[in-house]
Amino acid sequence: MVNYIWVFMTIVGLLFAVINGTWHEVNIAIFDGAKEAVTLCIGLISVLVFWLGMMRIAEESGLLEKLSKLFRPLVKILFPDVPANHPAMGYILSNMISNMFGLGNAATPLGIKAMEELKKLNGGKTEASRSMVTFLAINTASVTIIPTTVIAIRMNYHSASPTEIVVPTIIATLLSAIGAMLIDRYFYYRRSRKG
Amino acid sequence: MAIITYISLTFIPLLIGFILLYGTFKKVPTYESFVEGGKEGIKIAVSIIPFLVGMFVAISIFRASGALDALMNAIRPIMKSIGVPAEIVPLLIIRPISGTAALGMTSDLIAVYGPDSFIGRLASVLQGSTDTTFYVLTVYFGAVGIKKMGDALKVGLLADVVGIIVSIIVVGLIFGLK
């Protein structure tokens, strides 16, 4: 699937370059896109190293396990395939908590770690498991409590009340997370019916 | 609100302090563990470079060639007929594809229409309640080597659609349509 999407975007883009005569823009875009990706990854090194270092301490001291015990009832509903004391639970929870507080740079390393553990649970297969799809759905719905960046932008443009969007954002984000979970369940049952 | 701001400000420093103290209390070799865990971070960051380069180049071509604009123009009338303001449509399309571009568009919409307008508020809520599905998918699956995504993309994009619809309704109900 990702192969087709990738080729589709590129080829359609090239077709439009023919139609619009935007060859110059496309030439720049190719190298700018590549550069932006690398810059982003280099920027990620600092947060990845720091948070994965911290989380290693949390894991070895048993803190992650404690955390997953605390939220076990909730997460058990969301991830029925993950054993309660598995380290994946701890990472999934820390990822969700970081997202809630708008700590995107802490959330990414934890999310990757969670995926890694879920892959181990799935026997190291290169196919996405049920829990992986659920975890992704939660992440794309992005449950946020404090949209810090947006508040900063609104302050910049002299909003009468920069934070008035906090409550609507929480309501919207919760409802869309519930929606995401329902969609995820629907696709899961459709898959399992097909066998 | 002051409390929420305070929590978000102090959360990370306090969390770090707590992890370090708890680790010391449990007799974990804290510094050595930190370094071992950190090494993994370098590996992951480097290993996702090819995934992101591939995706970003395709997205850049799609955008720079004018294909994205054509897509938006095609979708705009449909969106308008179900009550979505035309001004917001580009943001809806860019949101799952590129986080930085979406953030740029949100600031632009807020700058042009004002932070306290319907469009400004809707852009703010949208930015907070949806995420860059393509990026999350590429990074998370790329880092651990998942080749078959299954329903992940479909579920992620449909979740974004739900987020958009919910945001429009919530903003409309709370602030009105002005």
Image: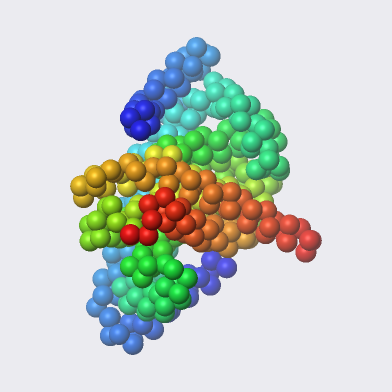
Residue extending furthest toward the bottom: A19
Q: Tell me which colouring the rendered structure shows.
A: rainbow
Q: Is residue B11 above or below residue B90?
A: above
As drawn, is A4 to the left or to the right of B99?
right
Dividing the picture into quadrants, the one containing residue B68 is bottom left
Point 37% across, 46% down: residue? A165
> Residue B77: where, in percent of width, then height?
42, 78
Q: Is residue A103 above or below residue A191?
A: above
As drawn, is A186 to the left or to the right of A110?
right
> Residue B74: where, in percent of width, then height?
41, 79
Q: Pick the quarter of the image with the C terminus of chain A.
A: bottom right
> Residue A102: where, in percent of width, then height?
40, 40
Q: Is residue A10 visible?
A: no
Q: Nearer the viewer, residue B149 or B72?
A: B72
Point 63% across, 57% down: residue? A183
Dividing the picture into quadrants, the one containing residue B151 is bottom right
Q: Is residue B19 visible?
A: yes
Point 49% across, 18% down: residue? B23
Point 33% across, 87% down: residue? A19
Q: Pick the quarter of the image with the N terminus of chain A.
A: bottom right
The total of numbered circles placed on residues is: 0
> Residue A59: where, in percent of width, then height?
54, 27
As drawn, is A128 to the left or to the right of B127?
right
Q: Nearer the viewer, residue A170 or B172?
A: B172
